[in-house]
Image (tube, rainbow, N blue to C red):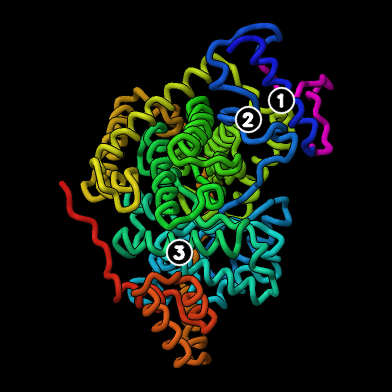
Amino acid sequence: MNADEIAAGRARWQARYDAARKRDADLTTLSGMSVDPVYGPPEGTDHPGFERIGWPGEYPYTRGLYPTGYRGRTWTIRQFAGFGNARQTNERYKMILGAGGGGLSVAFDMPTLMGRDSDDPQALGEVGHCGVAIDTAADMQTLFDGIDLAGVTTSMTISGPAVPVFCMYLVAAERQGADLSTLDGTLQTDIFKEYIAQKEWLFDPEPHLRLIGDLMEYCAREIPRYKPLSVSGYHIREAGSTAAQELAYTLADGFGYVELGLSRGLDVNVFAPGLSFFFDSHVDFFEEIAKFRAARRIWARWLRDVYGATSEKALWLRFHTQTAGVSLTAQQPVNNVVRTAVEALAAVLGGTNSLHTNALDETLALPTDESAEIALRTQQVLMEETGVTNVADPLGGSWYVEALTDKIEAEAEEIFARIRQLGGEGPHQIGPMTSGILRGIEDGWFTSQIAEAAFVYQQALEKSEKKIVGVNCHTNTVAKDLEILRISHEVELEQRRVLAERKVARDDAAVKAAVSRMVEISRTGENMIPAMLDAVRAEATLGEICDALRAEWGTYREPARF
């Protein structure tokens, strides 16, 4: 790019920056030195390839979505939390919000994630252990008691039974008196990554895609600010993928959901802004920063050039980040505070829109109040003390960072081509990327690629080619065992007792009629969300709704592979 083009870009950025709202904050260094809101090539100089870097808030968004960076607004502190029953988790949420958290993120227990009620035999011993137990809309009411759902953004990390859980969230908001059309939040819903990595599905892929398509339509029409899909790379990375694999598989899944929306006749400029993303921030500092920058650039280019998006917001890749749970160690667990801080800083320098920081004890148990507070304060130290919010994309133009961004992008493009090749020449019922994803799931291609990457890394650890402090180097310690949070068996007994009481108190005939009506709608082309909402309003349980759909659609079992 020549000097005149660079100067014109700087002028466009300046006009947008001047027109944007900025925070009232001290924007000097610790020593009082003033800094510019953005930095670029020296005036009057050429910079070949600068069109791939650009200016913040301008296509291809390598340097961020907004001309102000974090001078306009900082990232949302969104701490992931859930344990025991709804009342216990509600107390933790109020602690997080009272301590400065900006949004909520719900962790559900394993029975809920699998669409099972707490009194299901398969739930025995699992209720409340890795998240909060939610059986009915009444549980959701308790979960958010005293928290204005119309005034706080809420993310829910659940995919298999995401749609009925979302309906419970809407009914809880209704019972608060909220205007549902104004709700803002995110539902994970990403079923592709379940088959690829996390393995928490209910049905075959096609019925899940039916529900996701209905949800996309409903939200675009009724709740325009709500994001019905958070396409998740986090679990792919936690399963052992490389950074480039995480990026490529996640964006490919996102392209699949774009194809799903287009196949439903939806306008990409309307529904694409409702897609958000969820990435892992691992401990290799610069690789993670480059991954996030490449993600924005790839998404913008594909949405514009492949899927025909024309509105700016449809080209924006907005993402939440969580620090890497898999990087935490049971050995010398206090070291995890350092790992989490480095990973959080990488996410911030990569331009994350919201962030969860893991607690030091999460490799051992659910976080205690103290460790949860340390995790929260880690973000606040970065935000308030380090100066990283003063300049947009401060590493932009770094030879290393730009070269690494290009390299990760190139690797991702090679993977996209391979996925599309898996799908064949067509015709494609939904789209070519979707066909490739479904074939890759069926053939076990994704899981084999991730397994190979995990194996290579594990070999490097065992040979001490890669180091983990406290695990395969610097193992001597004076540290003592941590006090960890333990979930009492009484939680499960109480949850089952309350659920039994609710079943006795409700109108069984109304529940059965509403669930039957929902199943009837599933056999048509009609949107299922309104009928599912009616079932939830009648106090149908999550298990009853999911079991009715299992009876209709069957269940999915992953083929055995050796």
User: Is residue 161 among what the camera can see?
Assistant: yes
* Residue placed under numbered mark 3 in the picture: 214
Query: In the rendered view, does 456 fall on the left or right side of 57?
Result: left
* Residue placed under numbered mark 2 in the picture: 58
Residues at circles 2 and 3 in contact by the CB criterion of under 8 Å: no
Residue 555 lies within the magenta run:
no
Query: Could you tell me the amino acid type at mark 2?
Result: Glu
Q: Position of residue 119 (x, y in %)?
A: 40, 78
- Using the image as rendered, state which of residue 236 and residue 107 is in the foreground: 236
Crowding near the residue tagged with mark 2, few <14, some 14–19, many ≥20 C-alpha atoms within 10 Å: some
* Residue placed under numbered mark 1 in the picture: 12
Query: Could you tell me the amino acid type at mark 3?
Result: Asp
Residues at circles 1 and 2 in contact by the CB criterion of under 8 Å: yes
Name which residue lies at 34% across and 43% down. 433
Query: Dot 1 lies on which element?
Result: helix
Measure the C-alpha gap from mark 3 to mark 1.
Answer: 40 Å
Measure the C-alpha gap from mark 1 to mark 2.
Answer: 9 Å
Crowding near the residue tagged with mark 1, few <14, some 14–19, many ≥20 C-alpha atoms within 10 Å: some
Measure the C-alpha gap from mark 2 to mark 3.
Answer: 32 Å
Q: Position of residue 198 (x, y in %)?
A: 36, 52
- Using the image as rendered, state which of residue 163 and residue 146 is in the foreground: 163
Residue 35 lies within the magenta run:
yes
| Count of numbered tags | 3
Query: Dot 3 lies on which element?
Result: helix
- Using the rendered view, name the quadrant where residue 466 is placed: top left
User: Is residue 119 among what the camera can see?
Assistant: no
Query: Could you tell me the amino acid type at mark 1?
Result: Arg
Name which residue lies at 32% across and 44% down. 432
Stretch in magenta: 22-40
Q: Main secondary structure of the magenta part?
A: loop
157 in relation to 481, above or below: below
